[in-house]
Image (tube, rainbow, N blue to C red):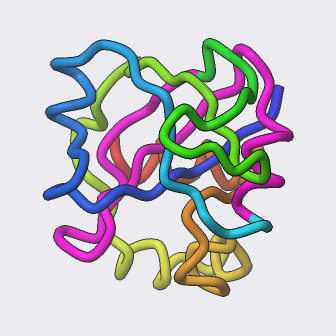
Amino acid sequence: MKHWLVKSEPFKYSWEKFNKDGRTFWDGVRNFQARNNLKEMKEGDLVLFYHSNEGKNVVGIAKVVKEFYQDPTTEDANWVVVDLIPVEALKNPVTLEQIKAEESLKDISLVRQGRLSVMPLKAEEFDKILEMGS
């Protein structure tokens, strides 16, 4: 199993809306590196849900329930989506400042490539963020 982090601006698609929907396809990715990360996601992989711009914090855990397929919001074959379901909210959202202050997380893409919207995490990085949010 691999671990991931996806970013969404809360005013566009919030954790609350995701929970209300119960399932969504992760669309709107228009960066090749992020697209390649979507293609790497496998059913059962766990995903941290991050609110970007407003809040700037990890708020919950999701799971991949369908591997990549053509993004239904565009006819451009370059772009794909995966289906995600919410698993659980973090007890305490983990802020970007907390992540940046944690030595063991200094190399994650969220810190190094702030604009990347879909990124892999090592198991220990994923676990550390969960620990920080419990």
Q: Does residue 1 appear left or right of residue 118 in this picture?
A: right
- Give me the residue at 38% from left, 21% from top: 86
Q: Nearer the viewer, residue 41 or 3?
A: 41
x and y, in percent, of residue 61 in the image = 44, 32
- Give me the residue at 14% from left, 58% from top: 11
Q: Nearer the viewer, residue 112 or 70?
A: 70
Vertical order, 7 against 96 (above or below): above
The quadrant holding residue 44 is top right
The C terminus - image quarter: top left
- Looking at the rendering, the stretch of residues picked out in magenta corresponds to 34-63
- Give me the residue at 62% from left, 57% from top: 118
Q: Nearer the viewer, residue 121 or 116?
A: 116
x and y, in percent, of residue 6 in the image = 52, 51
Q: Nearer the viewer, residue 24 or 64?
A: 24
The quadrant holding residue 33 is bottom right
The quadrant holding residue 91 is top left
- Give me the residue at 74% from left, 22% from top: 67
Vertical order, 31 against 48 (above or below): below
Image mark count: 0
The N terminus - image quarter: top right
Q: Does residue 73 appear left or right of residue 70 in this picture?
A: left
Q: Does residue 128 appear left or right of residue 69 in this picture?
A: left
Vertical order, 50 against 92 (above or below): below
Is residue 116 inside the magenta stretch?
no
x and y, in percent, of residue 30 in the image = 61, 65
Is residue 57 inside the magenta stretch?
yes
